[in-house]
Amino acid sequence: MIRPSGAKTNSPDRVNTILCGSPVRKLIAENYLPPVADSWLRSEPASIGLNAVRLDDAVEFARQHETDWLYDLSEQKAIASSEPPPWNEILGPFKPRGGPAGLIIRHGQIAVSWGDVERVDLTFSATKSYIGLCAAIAYRDGLIKDFDDPIGEYDSMKEFSSDHNDAITWRHLLQQTSEWEGTLWSKPDQVDRNRQVGPNANDSQKGLPRQLMKPGSYWEYNDVRVNLAALCLTRLFETSLSDVLRKTIMDPIGASHSWEWHGYRNSYVEINDESIQSVSGGAHWGGGLWISSLDHARMGLLIARQGWWGSVEILPKHCLAPLFDPCPLNLNYGFLWWLNSNRGLFAGAGESSVFAYGAGANYVWIDPDYDLVVVVRWINAESMNDFTALVMNSMIDL
């Protein structure tokens, strides 16, 4: 295992305050921000505190440790390929994946990039973190009054009417502790019961029945329930989450118009006499967010800047902070974001790091302490820890 030399350690409650007072190396107003999608400043690594030779080693490592997934994902059918029919039915669009690609950004400036960073590519469950951002927007706008409110108390949330489901709160659903029981878009929640995630996951029990626990008492990664979160937010906004994301975040930060957020052919709902597609939280059964590495990086930079884009506060810190508050049942998970509490996710990365993570593997890695944003696409998931350590080892101003 590669470990970073001289990397900082943080206090035990470091992740709790990632966006509520985390020091960054420059004042927000002094940090560079890319004005438009095609004019991002590229700087010599040394000028932004990075060793060029070590940085090249990290990039070459990412290239050499490409995922073994097929390029034609429609043939592989990715995650659903291991599920029995009819659970494995693909409901949303797929497209061939690209090759290894990514960017390493420090102080808002691109130090290095590789592959086709403009390619609009599937990002699998990194999509979930964008749903988390939509929840932060709903909280900012007063559509969610309190994350500890039972969802069934909100209008039109019929999926929470049973005795078991009526105790589920927004926090439960967003932290993946809801234990919601039901079927959505023809997929029963059981399809992801006993599911494990990560490089060494054992999915031999996935889909087998088990007794459901009290909401908030059990953590389990479940795509059906994440899709339910997307549906609930769609009802709050009364429009698609794609529109919400575009108008509230992506357009204001200068992202391209090339990204797409797909749902399923059967995930349309009627809202105010309009048929609106509820998007999916990944490409488990197709769909999800399709986005370029450059647009991913802009989102990451917004997080690193604590919700500010220059002089404009897009998401207040009190709205972003819950996304990165560790779940008591899984300290490496927040509101659909992965955390690095006690370096429990990646020992090679700093403890203040947060990740949007999707199968494949696809990552947006953000470390506010080091003013660092990294996008890496189609790396072997088992190699990600060593990649993070190589990037950290390239820093010459630790």
Image (cartoon, rainbow, N blue to C red):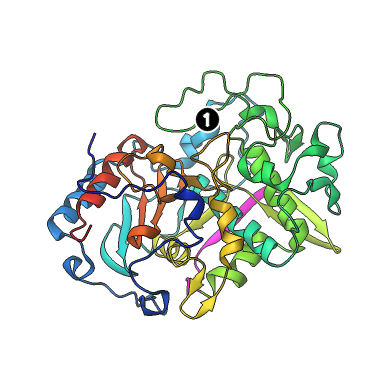
Q: Is residue 286 magenta?
A: no
User: In terms of secondary structure, where does tag 1 sit?
Assistant: helix
x 62%, y 62%: residue: 242
Pick the quarter of the image with the N terminus. top left
Quick one: which residue is furthest to the left in this view? 53
x 83%, y 48%: residue: 157
Q: Nearer the viewer, residue 376 or 119?
A: 376
Q: Is residue 390 left or right of residue 258?
A: left
Whether residue 95 is visible here, answered yes or no, is no
At label 1, the amino acid type is Ser
x 36%, y 58%: residue: 369
Magenta range is 253-265
| Residue 51 x %, y % | 16, 59
> Relative to 308, does residue 10 appear above or below in the rendering?
above
> Relative to 36, does residue 124 appear above or below in the rendering?
above
Question: Mark 1 sits on what residue?
Answer: 81
